[in-house]
């Protein structure tokens, strides 16, 4: 057997991994007394060991200081969300005042569409990818109806033009060219949730702006996964969650980006008191004065207990550095791809693009032979402590997250698929 395809090679790769010690910073679900092979960080990231201490700090301050915790120490609650701005900005390629942690993803999408989906009779339409995540579809359709238009005609979906549901940049360009005069907004994902395809967001933003449309990005599967350059790409806004690759826990506080060209008070928005300029917030005046930057889109008090786990995780990203994590991610996913082609070509089909620039951690897989075989494999893997996730109708998503995935975990996945398939 080719040495690359052996267990010894996987062990050697782990030994040479400069990020290997980061794995010890996470807690793993157990299977028969050993760590589960966990490939579901694209759905819910593992808990960092530092999370408990970060949350306990907030609980301790609450128990000993009560309301005075808002004003005490470097982690005072009044400015707690500001502790997250610089590390989040680094992850998404933005300026610190362009990002804020608040709400949840779909709430933020609605809030920012108040500002940036401003339809007219001439420009009522929104462009998205076909098969977008359902929450995005629901939010966009409801916004279109709210403004008195019909999603049947004004929610335009770009159909895949490549194999396995892949959408080329040329297809996006054609759709924007065809519908440009009617487009009020282009909303595009950083990474498509089902196929794992990553997009050239700089190009999408340029095409949308050239057509006179606003542009927003859903980065749920991109943040903490692929390099992002939001300030330079210059979309109007972006939204994302933190419970996937950012390991902030189930239902964690989400994130939002508003480009600095909109970070002044006259941009239309729904207002709330935490979005008021903090210099005069507690003067309790009736007039809303927006805080500069993305902070001006906040509504209520930040959820400190939800922000504490995010803060713990961001410390690990700062320690590792996103460039190093991206290098390891490319190596992990490339290794998985190599093993599938060499040992599982009769069992699995890879749907995600082969070009590393067009994917992040995730490889979307289809079992040859149909949905029932795919579901059977998925359930078998669960039974032996190898966890991916299932997306209808027939996709198994395997995401080797570089913060905590070993090459041996990938090798174990391949061996277990072979066992199931009788190879």
Image: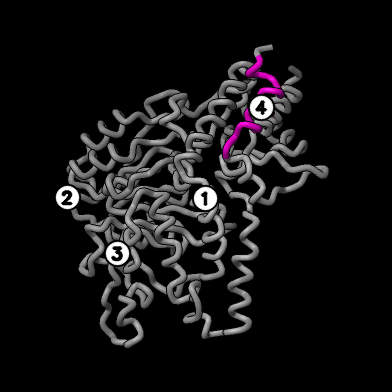
Q: Looking at the image, do the residues carrying marks 3 and 4 touch, with CB atoms under 8 Å apart?
A: no
Q: Position of residue 290 (x, y in %)?
A: 28, 72
Decide: few, some or many residues near mark 2? Use Cα within 10 Å; few <14, some 14-19, many ≥20. Answer: few
Q: Position of residue 350 (x, y in %)?
A: 54, 25
Decide: few, some or many residues near mark 1? Use Cα within 10 Å; few <14, some 14-19, many ≥20. Answer: few
- Whichever of labels 4 and 2 marks the residue nearer the N terminus, that label is 4
Q: Position of residue 27 (x, y in %)?
A: 68, 51
| Residue at x-position 63% and y-position 50% | 46
* Spatial CA span between label 3 and label 1: 27 Å
For the C terminus, the image quarter is top right
Q: Which residue is mark 4?
A: 12
Q: Which residues are magenta?
A: 3-18
Is 42 placed above or below 274 here?
Answer: above
Q: Secondary structure at mark 2?
A: loop
Quarter holding residue 50 = bottom right
Task: In this rendered view, identify the residue nearer to me: 195 or 11.
Answer: 11
Residue 181 is tagged as: none
Residue 373 in view = no
Decide: few, some or many residues near mark 3? Use Cα within 10 Å; few <14, some 14-19, many ≥20. Answer: many
In the figure, is residue 319 to the left or right of 280? right
Task: Mark 3 vs mark 1: give the one in front.
Answer: 1
| Residue at x-position 74% and y-position 43% | 35
Residue 319 is tagged as: 1
Task: Mark 2 vs mark 1: give the one in front.
Answer: 1
Q: Position of residue 342 (x, y in %)?
A: 61, 16
Residue 122 is tagged as: 2
Q: How many marks?
A: 4
Q: Secondary structure at mark 3?
A: helix
Task: In this rendered view, identify the residue nearer to me: 307 or 208.
Answer: 307
In the figure, is residue 77 to the left or right of 31? left
């Amino acid at each position: 057997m080719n040495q690359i395809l052996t267990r010894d090679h996987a062990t050697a790769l782990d030994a040479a991994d400069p990020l290997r010690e980061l794995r010890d910073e996470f807690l793993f679900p157990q299977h028969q007394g050993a760590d589960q092979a966990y490939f579901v960080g694209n759905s819910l990231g593992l808990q960092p060991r530092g999370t408990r201490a970060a949350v306990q700090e907030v609980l301790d301050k609450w128990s000993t200081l009560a309301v005075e915790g808002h004003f005490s120490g470097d982690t005072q609650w009044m400015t707690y969300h500001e502790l997250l701005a610089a590390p989040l900005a680094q992850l998404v390629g933005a300026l610190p005042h362009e990002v804020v942690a608040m709400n949840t993803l779909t709430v933020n999408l609605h809030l920012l569409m108040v500002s940036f989906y401003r339809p007219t009779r001439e420009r009522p339409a929104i462009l998205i990818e076909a098969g977008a995540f359902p929450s995005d579809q629901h939010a966009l359709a409801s916004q279109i109806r709210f403004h008195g238009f019909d999603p049947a005609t004004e929610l335009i979906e770009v159909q895949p033009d490549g194999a396995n549901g892949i959408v080329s940049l040329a297809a996006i360009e054609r759709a924007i060219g065809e519908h440009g005069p009617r487009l009020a907004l282009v909303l595009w994902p950083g990474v498509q949730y089902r196929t794992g395809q990553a997009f050239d967001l700089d190009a999408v933003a340029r095409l949308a702006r050239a057509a006179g449309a606003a542009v927003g990005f859903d980065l749920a599967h991109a943040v903490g996964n692929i390099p992002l350059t939001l300030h330079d790409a210059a979309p109007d806004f972006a939204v994302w969650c933190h419970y996937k690759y950012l390991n902030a826990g189930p239902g964690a506080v989400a994130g939002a980006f508003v480009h600095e060209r909109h970070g002044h008070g006259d941009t239309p928005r729904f207002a709330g008191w935490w979005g008021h300029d903090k210099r005069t917030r507690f003067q309790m005046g009736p007039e809303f004065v927006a805080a500069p930057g993305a902070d001006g889109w906040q509504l209520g008090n930040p959820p400190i207990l939800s922000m504490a786990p995010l803060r713990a995780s961001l410390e690990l990203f700062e320690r590792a550095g996103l460039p190093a994590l991206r290098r390891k991610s490319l190596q992990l996913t490339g290794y998985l791809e190599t093993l599938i082609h060499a040992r599982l070509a009769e069992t699995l089909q890879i749907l995600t693009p082969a070009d590393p620039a067009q994917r992040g951690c995730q490889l979307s897989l289809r079992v040859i032979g149909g949905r029932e075989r795919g579901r059977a494999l998925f359930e078998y893997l669960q039974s032996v402590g190898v966890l991916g996730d299932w997306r209808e109708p027939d996709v198994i998503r395997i995401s080797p997250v570089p913060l905590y995935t070993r090459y041996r975990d990938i090798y174990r996945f391949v061996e277990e698929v072979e066992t199931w398939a009788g190879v």
